[in-house]
Image: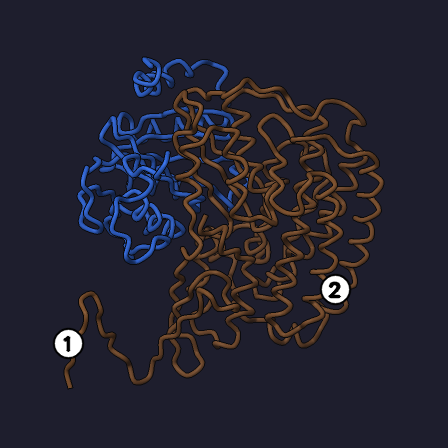
Chain colours: A brown, B blue
Amino acid sequence: MTTQLPPGIQLEKVDERIMTLNVGPQHPGSGHMRLIIRVDGDRIVSCDPDPGYVHRGEEKMAEYRNYITNIPHLERPVIHDSCNILYPYCLGVEELLGLQVPERAKYVRVIASELNRFTYTLYWLAIYGIFLGHSTMFMWPAGDREFAIDLLEKLTGARVTHAYFVPGGVRNDLPANFEDVCLRQVNYLEKRLKTYGDIFYDNPILISRTEKTGVLSRQDAIRLGTTGTVLRASGVDYDLRVKEPYDVYDELDVHTNVLKNGDSYDRSKTPWLDMLESCNIIRQALEKMPKSGSVRVKLKPNPKGGNDEVYKRVESGRGALGAYIVSRSKPEPYRVKLSVGSFRNLICMPHLLKGEKLGNMPAVYWSLNYWPVEADR
Amino acid sequence: MSDSENSEQEIQAQPVEEKQPDLPKFEKDQSDKITTKFGSKTEIAFVKPNRIKINVKKEDILDVATFIRDELNYDHAESVTGVDFPADKEIEVVYHLGSYTDPQLDKQVLSLATRATREDDPNPGKDSTRLPSLRDIFYSVEFHERECFEMLGVFFDGHPDNRRLLLPEDWADLPPLRKDFAIKGR
């Protein structure tokens, strides 16, 4: 039987053995992206990631706004980690405009970006827990995240989307008594984080589901250009806070957590170890921070960069986050490119999911610490 | 406005001014290795602390990239950025390369830039704005080049998978990051 098809519509040949599944873009198991997965029985034959469902053209928008008005929209790709995504942009603009950031502002930035690492990673951990069927691991991080969010709300005025970093410092100084409250809550969070180890990371069910699934070898991690927790879980010692310290990270003692196996278990454990390290960093920064001083340099109205380009990078919750800014003596940047960790780790998905069981897909997918909105920008 | 019109010449003029003795030594050595090997084929755009930028013609980029990978130990690409220069009728593609294996290069980012002739009316997939793909040399550029292809309309020869990535399948307009694609109301 032949029927006339409407123009533009094609029929796809269906294999008898291989079935194509569209996971997403509105499937809760994939976030806001689509994975086109071909399965043979319950084995994945191939996986074709199709991001772009939440593409918003941040880079194009940045070409129409000046250096300061770019700030509130450039943080949108990761609203939980908005300090970190603005960090390389601010560092780049400071180099272009030749701004010297006050010492106190540098410490405030470190504290804000480490607290943001908490809010992002706890959110990610909650999702990872619920997709492995561990509902306690959803409730606990989602609840504890409020402590970090409360601190950031005190500091910046907003629960998420802080728009707190500006070229030349931060938007406002610490509120009264912030140091004490911060220290108390970070100590509490650290205590809570250690209990996650007992309930989640030592849990035999989690171990049996994630150990030896989706193994990324050290060579592949380097060849694929992965970054952040994915890279460190595969045994590569690379953390930009140590390797290319920005602001005052060189004055703080930062320990890099490196795990060896490169499986989903190690990839899920590295962000948790990073959060514990963040507690240490925040305590050190609170101690070493100058007790008073300015936190922002005054900018000229509509500042212009020269004919120059900069590439700055920081370590975010998802890995290295680079900002490439091309300036052509205008108040607006000529081109802004955000090189984000999620997009760089996207290439792992076809590599890791091939040959894996379909049931292991969420365990592998979410262990990549992937944030679809950030990858789409 | 004469500043912005002269901007391209000023960019070309910059490296001459910057070749002063206070250049960072390690970065200078790196760039010297490339210039001694390739001579006039490459042009050092700038040498700054931890950052080097090298301009090459598109015919030579595969050779230079292979040299950078094998001799200078850069092993992955961090990002691939297309920049549209309608005044020059060119599109520049910048590869930011880094290294995980060589501890000396931890801080370094090498920008390898090349330019392609810009076709005014890109026909997606068949346009003549073409560059050789670096995917066989740096495997990690695969998705970055796909993004560059759809956003700037640069077709990468030798890329196994030149398909759309972020844009919708039925996108029938100019590649959006070209300068002549204007946002409504701006």
* Residue for badge 2: A197
Q: Regarding mark 2 in the picture, which secondary structure is present there?
A: helix
Residue A17 pos. (x, y %): 33, 84
Q: Chain of mark 1?
A: A
Q: Regarding mark 1 in the picture, which secondary structure is present there?
A: loop
* Residue for badge 1: A4
Quadrant of the drawing holding the N terminus of chain A: bottom left
Residue A318 pos. (x, y %): 57, 51
In this rendering, the answer to whether A218 lies above or below B32 is: below
Left/right placement of residue B181 relative to residue B78 reads left
- Identify residue type, mark 1: Gln
| Distance Cα–Cα, label 2 vs label 1 | 60 Å
Residue A93 pos. (x, y %): 52, 28
Q: Chain of mark 2?
A: A
Left/right placement of residue B165 relative to residue A296 reads left
Q: Residues within 10 Å of mark 2 (few under 14, many from 20)?
A: some
Residue closest to the far front? B185
CB contact under 8 Å: marks 2 and 1: no
Residue A197 pos. (x, y %): 74, 64
Q: Nearer the viewer, residue B137 or A229?
A: A229
Toward which corner of the image does residue A251 lie, by quadrant?
top right
- Identify residue type, mark 2: Gly
Q: Is residue A336 visible?
A: yes
